[in-house]
Image (cartoon, rainbow, N blue to C red):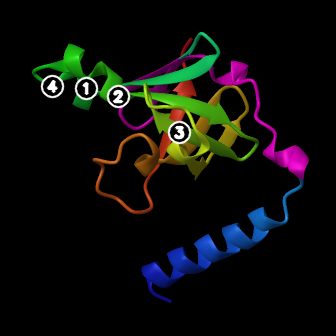
């Protein structure tokens, strides 16, 4: 089986399994367990800062791509996201957009060790990474 077929089959299975989830599983979590500073396990210079602003949970991607940009301060909003944590998913929208349901995109989210280590697809916050099946793994530092 080619890698593409494996990916398609895996996606199909995930969709089938997620279709049977109860409403309890769709409950938005507080996000408290995500608040803090997280380091990218594979690129230790890249961090996420997750904090509350008003009633919103904000994820700031303090990556090298942001810090090395000539006008980084002007681009801070482009590297900031509003997020909603679900049991096995995270909804992400660009910070500052109207927060209606259509603005958020859903990505799978996996605790490898709850409150300590998680992963999610690179396309969720770093669409500039040219990799279809790449995962970002983050470890809590604060």
Highlighted magenta segment, given as a residue range: 23-50
**Secondary structure under badge 2?**
helix
Q: CA separation, marks 2 and 3?
A: 12 Å
Task: Find out whether the residues at labels 1 and 4 contact each other: C-beta distance under 8 Å.
Answer: yes
Q: Earlier in the sequence, mark 1 or mark 3?
A: 1
Please say if the residues under marks 2 and 1 sit with CB atoms less than 8 Å apart.
yes
Judging by the rendered image, the residue that carries numbered circle 3 is 92
Q: CA distance from mark 2 to mark 1?
A: 7 Å
Query: Badge 3: few (under 14), some or many (20 or more) residues near its Cα, within 10 Å?
Result: many
Residue drawn where x is 29% and y is 56% of the image: 130
Residue on which disc 4 sits? 69
Q: Give neighbour class at mark 1: few <14, some 14-19, many 20+ (Cα, 10 Å).
A: some
The CA distance from mark 1 to mark 4 is: 6 Å
Front disc: 2 or 1:
2
Q: How many neighbours does mark 2 have within 10 angstroms: few (below 14), some (14-19), or many (20 or more)?
A: some
State left or right for residue 109 relative to residue 1: right
The count of marks equals: 4
Image location of residue 95, percent across then percent down: 44, 27
Is 9 placed above or below 105 here?
A: below
Does label 4 or label 2 sit earlier along the sequence? 4
Q: Nearer the viewer, mark 1 or mark 3?
A: 3
Residue where numbered disc 1 is placed:
66
Residue at point 21% right, 17% down? 74
Q: Is residue 45 visible?
A: no
Which residue occupies 73% across, 32% down? 114
- Any magenta on residue 41? yes
Q: Nearer the viewer, mark 4 or mark 2?
A: 2
| Point 44% across, 80% down: residue | 4
Work out whether mark 4 precedes mark 3 in sequence or the reverse, and give the earlier one.
4
Residue 47's x, y, as percent? 41, 23
Is residue 132 left or right of 86 when viewed as pictured?
left
In whole angstroms, how far apart are the C-alphas of marks 1 and 3? 18 Å
């Amino acid at each position: 089986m080619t890698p593409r077929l494996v990916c398609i089959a895996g996606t199909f299975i995930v969709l089938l399994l997620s279709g049977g989830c109860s409403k309890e599983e769709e409950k938005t979590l507080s996000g408290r367990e995500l608040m803090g500073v997280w380091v990218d396990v594979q690129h230790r210079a890249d961090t996420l800062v997750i904090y509350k602003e008003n009633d919103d949970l904000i994820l700031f991607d303090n990556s090298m791509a942001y810090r090395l940009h000539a006008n980084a301060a002007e681009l801070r909003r482009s590297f900031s996201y509003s997020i909603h944590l679900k049991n096995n998913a995270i909804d992400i929208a660009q910070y500052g957009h109207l927060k209606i349901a259509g603005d958020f995109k859903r990505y799978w989210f996996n605790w490898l060790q709850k409150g300590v280590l998680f992963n999610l697809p690179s396309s969720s916050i770093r669409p500039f990474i040219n990799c279809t099946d790449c995962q970002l793994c983050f470890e809590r530092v604060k």
